[in-house]
Image (cartoon, rainbow, N blue to C red):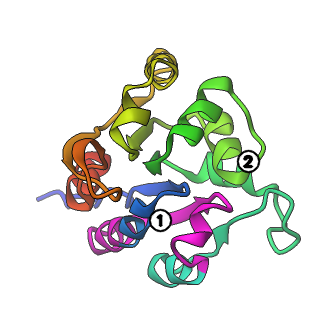
Amino acid sequence: MARRVPARPKRVALGVSGSIAAYKACLIVRGLVRAGAEVRVAMTPSAAKFVSPLTLATLSRAPVYEDVHAAEHWEMAHLSLASWADRVLIAPATADTIARLAQGRAGGPLEALVLSTTAPVAVAPAMDTEMWEHPATKANVVRLRDYGYKIWGPVSGDLASGRVGMGRMLEPDDLVRRILA
């Protein structure tokens, strides 16, 4: 009887942007690691105001990429991370992050990762309803889809503003299932 060779664990690069939903990135990392995936995190400076890089580094068991010019990353971090990843997930993706990705900007580690990777990219929006429904955001999402990126969400539900409406990020378990599928 032939032995099955187990598949290499998936390598997921998680981009975290500055939204109150950034705390859910901890649950995404934990879910991915529990499922056997290797995880590396790139985050925007705004994301670090919502969730600690140390928390994400501890959960992922890997350094967090916060600065494309950081001396402690001896390789060009965005290039090595981009080539390492089997999949890239941006969660949460703010309206600002979506706009920067749509423009092809690479000013920070998250954007540089996305611009440099050949891996499939999924984007999980999180923002208030008015921002999600703005014509600029809609146009940016169309452009991301044209690039071949998957847009997962948002959904309607409770928002950080206290309102209920479209703009809530998909739940971490759902994102974990999707990125590993």
Question: Residue 98, how many percent across, how many down?
Answer: 54, 35
Q: 140 and 163: which one is in front?
A: 163
Q: Quadrant of the C terminus?
A: top left
Q: Vertical placement of 33 versus 84: above or below? A: below
Quarter where residue 68 is shown: bottom right
Quarter where residue 47 is shown: bottom right
Q: Which residue is mark 1?
A: 39
Q: Secondary structure at mark 1?
A: strand
Q: Which residue is mark 2?
A: 79
| Residue located 29% across and 40% down the image | 154
Outermost residue toward the front? 162
Q: Secondary structure at mark 2?
A: helix
Sooner in the amino-acid sequence: mark 2 or mark 1: 1
Magenta-tinted stretch = 27-53
| Residue located 31% across and 37% down the image | 152
Would you say residue 32 sits in the magenta stretch? Answer: yes
Q: How would you rate the neighbour count of disc 1 (Cα within 10 Å): few for under 14, some for 14-19, many for 20 or more?
A: many
- Contact? badges 2 and 1 (CB < 8 Å): no
Q: 65 and 96: which one is in front?
A: 96
Q: Amino acid at mark 2?
A: Leu
Question: Residue 3, how many percent across, how many down?
Answer: 20, 61
